[in-house]
Image: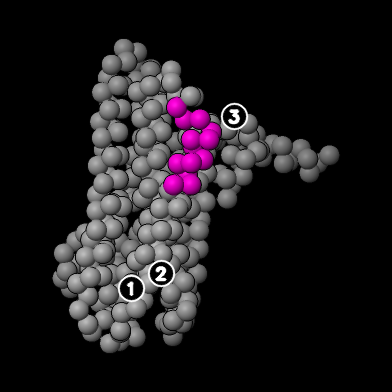
Amino acid sequence: MVIVLVFMKDPKLQIPMYFFLSNLSLLDLCFTSSCVPQMLVNFWGSEKTISYIGCAIQLYVFLWLGATECVLLVVMAIDRCVAVCHPLHYTTTMHPRVCLQLATLAWGTGLVQSLIQSPATLQLPLCSRIIDDIVCEVPALIQLSNTDTTYNETQMSISSIFLLVVPLIIILSSYDAIVHAVLRIKSNAGQKKAFGTCTSHLLVVSLFYGTVTGVYLQPKSPYAHEQAKFLTLFYTVVTPTLNPLIYTLRNKEVKGALIRLGRRTWDSQNK
């Protein structure tokens, strides 16, 4: 919330990089809010239950925000690639209208993905009401069905290819272009600055994709399922918590904006 507020209040951060960062911060806030409160209730109480309506809502929102983050991280990689590889055309290429369209594309793609996959999952007849997972997500609900789930598993595989494999290929291709562009910079200071603007995003990508792919792309087995529950906890709680810290602690402009916002708030309260 602080990052979103700082972006809105500080004129120096009114550039595409921080526009997408504020979108990611808002996304992470909503992502954790969709599952962590119920998770904490279940961890604390003796009855570890969730209503059917609550599970359905959680599934829709969880899928929507998870798919949105996959696309948004690609958009952020493309933004960094344009900034490093084509700096003279950056302001015209990443026009505010284009940035808004890309952000809308990310949120819209996630919503469409959720509206397609969630109903197909919820229509499955269930042989058990015990969900062996910490959230209501597609792999856990498919395991509860006593009918043929080939269609749902195929749908999940296709979605994983389009939302995990393809975006990861685009991100790695973008960073390959970035590395080649940076190596052509003769100044060591210039190389360090260029790499510095990308390392935070690359670290976030590694944390998110490294855990999500372990849940949706690993083969079926009892060990894999137990591992998937840990990975689910990681990308639903740990990764969204670390993202703001990664971007603020490694970014002088964000830290400077936080200090300026704090000073303005303090001055206004003491007038």
> Mark 1 to mark 2: distance in Å?
9 Å
Which one is earlier in the sequence, the residue at label 2 or at label 3? Answer: 3
Determine the residue positioned at 72% across, 41% down: 265
Q: Position of residue 201 (x, y in %)?
A: 38, 39
Where does the magenta region start and end? 93-105
Q: Where the C terminus falls, by quadrant?
A: top right
Main SS category, magenta section: helix
Q: Position of residue 76 (x, y in %)?
A: 40, 39
The answer to which of 8 and 153 lies nearer the viewer is 153
In the displayed structure, does residue 157 sit left or right of residue 187?
left
Does dot 2 land on a helix, a strand or a loop?
helix
- Single out the mark in the foreground, 1 or 2: 1
| Marks 2,3: beta carbons within 8 A | no
Which one is earlier in the sequence, the residue at label 1 or at label 2? Answer: 2
Q: Residues within 10 Å of mark 3 (few under 14, many from 20)?
A: few
Which one is earlier in the sequence, the residue at label 1 or at label 3? Answer: 3
To which residue does mark 2 refer? 59
Q: Amino acid at mark 1?
A: Thr
Could you tell me if residue 90 is visible in this image? yes
To which residue does mark 3 refer? 12
To which residue does mark 1 refer? 121
Determine the residue positioned at 26% across, 81% down: 145
The answer to which of 99 and 11 lies nearer the viewer is 99
